[in-house]
Image (cartoon, grey):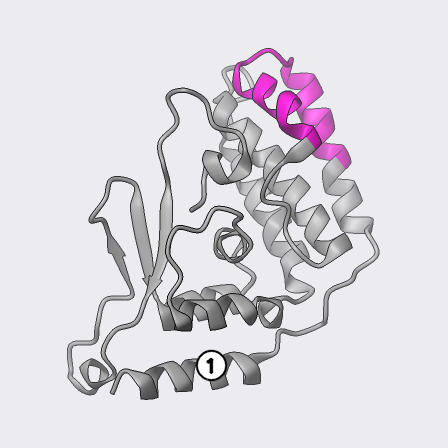
């Protein structure tokens, strides 16, 4: 599970955002028409990636996908899913510094500073906090902990934009300057070994 409930930022009207991984039958890849790389549903706000697509995104340090691997709220785990969770450190690399900073910058550029969308502003800051924690400690910060009340105040529009922007700039600078604990490259061989094993299981 991801979204506000995983981040500990839920309110009474928050949706339940479910994210998952599925495995397409291996024989389906032998056809001209390949299996879907993702699926919506069947529950509202549910989205799942085919395992290969998920692995590729994780190897690229996609923030959403990496945070899924560290989500503290897990509803269903298959044996293959557990092996994927056990492998999560293999996806990490220095590239995460750029992807988390880049996603936050994209959010910033889409914000109208005269009329900010405060929920979007909150998640912009949350992404920077998560990326900074990842670079420093080797895992993203999913649950926001001590930052919860300040982030929720941003969401409610109670924090002036200048203060939000100053926090963003400070976190961006910290993320750029933070000493790195991540490897230069992900462990692609371990990920490929996992993926080949899953494909063999689903022949």
Residue plotted at (39% across, 27% down): 14
Q: Is residue 42 left or right of residue 179?
A: left
Q: Is residue 162 above or below residue 68?
A: above
Is 19 a magenta residue? no
Which quarter of the picture shows residue 95?
bottom right
Q: Is residue 48 left or right of residue 124?
A: left
Q: Quadrant of the C terminus?
A: bottom left
Counting from the top left corner in percent of width and height, residue 85 is at 51, 65
Residue plotted at (53% across, 48% down): 72
Q: Nearer the viewer, residue 167 or 137?
A: 137
Tally of marks? 1
Is 161 a magenta residue? yes
Residue plotted at (22% across, 49% down): 41
Counting from the top left corner in percent of width and height, residue 162 is at 69, 18
Residue plotted at (60% across, 11% down): 158
- The residue range painted magenta reads 146-170
Q: Is residue 33 above or below residue 140?
A: below
Task: Name the residue tied to disc 1.
Answer: 194
Q: Is residue 26 left or right of residue 142?
A: left
Counting from the top left corner in percent of width and height, residue 96 is at 63, 58
Q: Is residue 118 above or below residue 60?
A: above
Q: Residues within 10 Å of mark 1 (few under 14, many from 20)?
A: some
Q: Is residue 38 left or right of residue 12?
A: left
Q: Nearer the viewer, residue 160 or 19?
A: 19
Q: Main secondary structure of the magenta part?
A: helix
Q: Secondary structure at mark 1?
A: helix
Q: Is residue 2 above or below residue 195?
A: above
């Amino acid at each position: 599970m991801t979204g506000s409930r995983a981040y500990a930022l839920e309110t009474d009207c928050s949706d339940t955002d479910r994210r998952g991984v599925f495995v397409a039958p291996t024989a389906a890849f032998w056809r001209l028409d390949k299996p879907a790389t993702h699926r919506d549903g069947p529950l509202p706000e549910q989205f799942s990636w085919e395992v290969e697509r998920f692995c590729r995104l994780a190897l690229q340090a996609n923030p959403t996908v990496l945070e899924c691997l560290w989500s503290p709220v897990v509803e269903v785990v298959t044996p293959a899913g557990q092996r994927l969770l056990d492998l999560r450190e293999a996806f990490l690399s220095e590239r995460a510094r750029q992807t988390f900073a880049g996603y936050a910058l994209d959010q910033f550029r889409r914000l109208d500073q005269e009329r900010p969308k405060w929920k979007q502003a909150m998640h912009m800051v949350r992404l920077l906090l998560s990326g900074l924690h990842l670079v420093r400690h080797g895992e993203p910060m999913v649950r926001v902990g001590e930052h919860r009340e300040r982030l929720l105040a941003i969401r409610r529009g109670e924090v002036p934009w200048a203060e939000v922007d100053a926090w963003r700039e400070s976190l961006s600078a910290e993320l750029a300057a933070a000493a790195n604990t991540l490897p230069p490259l992900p462990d692609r061989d371990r990920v490929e070994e996992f993926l080949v094993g899953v494909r063999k299981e689903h022949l």
